[in-house]
Amino acid sequence: MKKVRVAIIGQGRSGRDIHGQFFRCTANTKYEVAVVIEKDEYRREKALKEYPGCEVFADYSALYDRKDIDVVVNASYSQMHYSISKDLLEHGLNVLVEKPMGRTYYECLDLIKTAKDNGVIIAAFQQTFVNPFNLGLKEIVASGKIGTPLQYSINFNGFARRWDWQTVQRNAAGGIYNTGPHPIGLALDYLDFAEDFEVAFSKLGLGLTSGDSDDYAKVILTAPGKPVVDVEVSSMDAFSNPYTVKVMGTRGTLLATRAGYKLKYIVDGENPERPVIFESLSHENGCPAYCSEKLVAHEEEGEWKVESNLDTTAHTKKEEGGTLDKFDPATKNFYDLFYESIVNGAPLPVAAEHSAMVIAVIEAVHAQNPLPVKY
């Protein structure tokens, strides 16, 4: 089996602790890290130990003339995603860029065009689309058990504060750029990526962060003939059940988390239709009454199917500042599909055009809610 040779730009929390963590994991049998680009000398030296046989450089220009690199993982700073990806594409390299794909919809479309013009691939790493919980949720909805979806409520909330570079607007940062691509991507997925989608409402706020970017976002999306999708990304929700999607349909409700799901629904025919009574309802004693009945309902719950023999043991023991002992199975799902794209020309796990739509939403939300720039 051909191994895909990878170059990683950046050994920060994304480059090392998400992508690198997977590449170092024994579950990875399809990729090998050939090159690491990192400005920090300590991290370069660390990379030599963590990716045996790799080469390290301080500047990504070292990749320009390489013909032995199958894909470059662009895990640079968010504000650099567009410029570095475009440069690499123009030099004939396939690029997998961390989210956000770009700062604006235009930047994303330009990357797509540049990739096409140079006969290479541009893809955004949005593994949430192939997370077991999303795949399982969509399967249940497609079964029709809860009827026709009327509303999806997506909660990516928490209770924490940040003070790093990802709290400053000039760095294409803030909650809606950092975390937002995950739930907004799901929202567009639930709308079937309808091109006539609408940002029906949005609000950005700033509470606990030390920077000038948002740490509260409410976004409501819809499209003609589609359900309403309510997205929340907040750092001020002390009582949240984070990373949940609730689907309300015409026959019941589905609550999905990363671990599993709960389902409550009715079945046609088990609750005969009640005829409309146009007069006020009364008890037998004549006192006023309210519509009251106990619906015949069915309840289910379970865990998502995750590959039972998945060995998530890393080649490197957990160290300070690292999370090498586990990884989200969505990462493996994504990279398994991406392998087929690189090696066999299969469709990308997430179409670049869909990733661009995510940024179109984020750009629209910022336009509707301009925040003061302090830095």
Image (tube, rainbow, N blue to C red):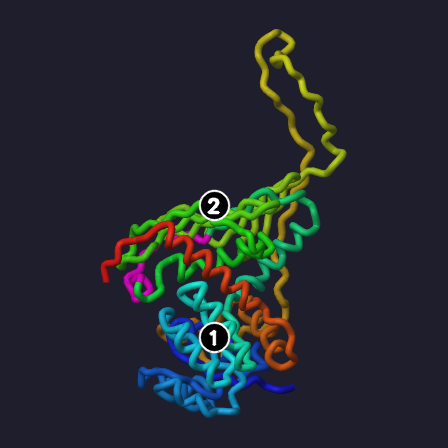
* Residue 312 spot, x, y in % from top left: 54, 73
Q: Which residue is mark 2?
A: 200
Q: Residue at x 65, y 50 (%)?
A: 141
Residue farthest to the left, as pictured: 374
Is residue 272 visible in the rendered image? The answer is yes
Give the vertical position of 134 relative to 100 (above or below).
above
Query: Disc 1 and disc 2: Cα gap in Å?
Result: 35 Å
Task: Name the element at disc 2.
Answer: strand
- Where the C terminus falls, by quadrant? bottom left
Q: Which residue is mark 1?
A: 19
Q: Which of these two is toward me, 50 or 146?
A: 146
* Residue 223 spot, x, y in % from top left: 56, 48
Label 1: few (<14), some (14–19) or many (≥20) C-alpha neighbours in 10 Å: many
Residue 342 falls left or right of residue 218: right
Q: Please give the range of residues in magenta.
A: 156-169
Q: Residue at x 45, y 49 (%)?
A: 219
**Which of pointers 1 and 2 lies earlier in the amino acid sequence?**
1
Q: Which of these two is toward me, 135 or 101?
A: 101
Task: Name the element at disc 1.
Answer: helix
Q: Residue flagged by tag 2: what amino acid is it?
A: Ala
Give the vertical position of 15 relative to 140 (above or below).
below
Asked where in the image residue 248 lies, by quadrant, the reply is top right
Is residue 329 visible in the rendered image? The answer is no
